[in-house]
Image (tube, rainbow, N blue to C red):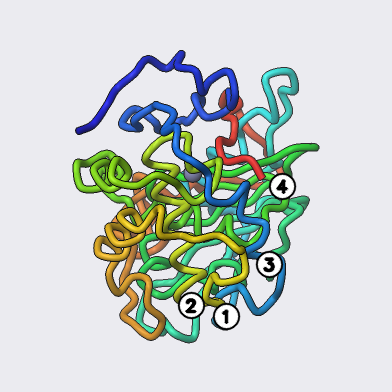
């Protein structure tokens, strides 16, 4: 059963940013009201050996003056509702093809990074390298900007966006949204919602926001548990969310396993995986020109 409530539900008082999800028309908005197994995922990143191992990635910078459409559009968003400067001046926007040694046959991922982003290029490459090949493959572009004193992240279901400096679990969280394909169809469907209903807890308090955020957190928990250190260090019994763990594991299948196949992201930013489709969707502009117009500020929805 999928439940719909108004966007002015009780959770908006607690976490106002969640309602600003820019592509959230299909998100089921409700407070799951489950016990949170963990307060947050800090424990998962607290020790280096708890994280899934990093697969080596290599970046090749694009020639200046060409930008994937969704990177270009994110750069020309206003910093905030009260600061009309762009999130990234075009001359500061760097585009990279990124390949991984476990995905040699796949088209490169595209990383768009503003030169003042808190998250370094290497941290971005390494963070994505903690995803197994299948889960990583569903991500189209990775776009990182400065957080301007705050920050957060979100996914539109194809690409992932970040302002500021997230912890490593962020990469898994947003990538899981990209694996919840076709408008977050799995997390809005009966299988997932029945799994939630059969359990008494969710992974952490953020997962309580709605089934889509819960799925992203359960997928992250699974990635760390399977590919990192078995999550036996929290002192908590995860059997209270066993139906969610089983349902997500079944749905994600070998996308959660290291050593599996890579594939090109099925999504699009109206374009590309950057270059397979020629110039369609690639903005060509002199980086010294600046933007003719800005887009409104879009808040990030995943706080960190
Ligand atoms: Zn999320």
Residue drawn 37% across the image and 71% down it: 256
The secondary structure type at the circle numbered 4 is loop
The spot of residue 289 in percent (x, y) is 68, 39
Is residue 293 among what the camera can see? no
Query: Marks 2 and 4, how far apart in space?
Result: 26 Å
Q: Earlier in the sequence, mark 2 or mark 3?
A: 3
Question: Which quadrant would residue 132 be assigned to in this image?
Answer: bottom left
Q: Toward the viewer: 99 or 33?
A: 33
Residue drawn 73% across the image and 45% down it: 146
Q: Are marks 2 and 3 in contact (CB under 8 Å)?
A: no
- Could you classify mark 4 by the number of other residues whose Cα lies within 10 Å: few (under 14), some (14-19), or many (20 or more)? many
Residue at mark 2:
227
Q: Toward the viewer: 101 or 181?
A: 181
Q: Are marks 1 and 2 in contact (CB under 8 Å)?
A: yes
- For the N terminus, the quadrant is top left
**Of the residues tagged 3 and 1, which is closer to the observer?**
1
Is residue 261 among what the camera can see? yes
Left or right, 27 with reference to 172? left
Left or right, 287 with reference to 195? right
Residue drawn 71% across the image and 41% down it: 89
- Could you classify mark 1 by the number of other residues whose Cα lies within 10 Å: few (under 14), some (14-19), or many (20 or more)? some
The secondary structure type at the circle numbered 3 is helix
Residue at mark 1:
53
Residue at mark 4:
164
Q: Is residue 171 above or below residue 61?
A: above
Query: Marks 3 and 1, how far apart in space?
Result: 13 Å
Q: Earlier in the sequence, mark 1 or mark 2?
A: 1
Residue drawn 28% across the image and 45% down it: 198
Q: Earlier in the sequence, mark 3 or mark 1?
A: 1
Q: Earlier in the sequence, mark 2 or mark 4?
A: 4
């Amino acid at each position: 059963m999928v439940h719909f409530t108004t966007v002015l539900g009780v959770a908006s008082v607690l976490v106002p940013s969640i309602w600003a999800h820019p592509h959230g028309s299909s998100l089921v908005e409700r407070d799951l009201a489950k016990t949170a197994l963990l307060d947050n995922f800090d424990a998962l990143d607290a020790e280096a050996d708890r994280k899934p191992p990093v697969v080596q990635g290599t970046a090749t910078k694009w020639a200046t003056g060409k930008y994937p459409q969704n990177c270009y559009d994110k750069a020309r968003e206003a910093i905030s509702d009260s600061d009309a400067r762009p999130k990234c001046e075009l001359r500061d926007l760097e585009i990279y093809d990124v390949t991984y040694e476990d995905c040699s046959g796949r088209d490169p991922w595209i990383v768009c990074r503003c030169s003042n982003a808190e998250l370094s290029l290497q941290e971005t490459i390494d963070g994505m390298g903690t995803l197994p090949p299948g889960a990583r493959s569903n991500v189209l572009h990775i776009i990182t900007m400065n957080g301007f004193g705050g920050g957060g992240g979100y996914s539109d279901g194809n690409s992932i966006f970040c302002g500021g400096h997230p912890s490593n679990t962020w990469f898994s969280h947003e990538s899981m949204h990209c694996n919840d394909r076709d408008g977050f169809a799995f997390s809005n469907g009966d299988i997932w919602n029945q799994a939630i209903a059969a359990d008494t807890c969710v992974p952490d308090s953020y997962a309580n926001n709605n089934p889509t955020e819960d799925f992203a957190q359960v997928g992250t928990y699974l990635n760390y548990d399977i590919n990192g250190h078995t999550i036996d260090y929290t002192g908590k019994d995860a059997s209270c969310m066993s139906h969610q763990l089983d349902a997500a594991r079944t749905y994600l299948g070998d996308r959660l396993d290291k050593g599996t196949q890579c594939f090109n992201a099925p999504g699009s930013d109206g374009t590309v995986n950057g270059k397979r489709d020629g110039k369609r969707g690639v903005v060509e502009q002199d980086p010294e020109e600046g933007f003719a117009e800005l887009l409104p500020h879009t808040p990030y929805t995943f706080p960190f």
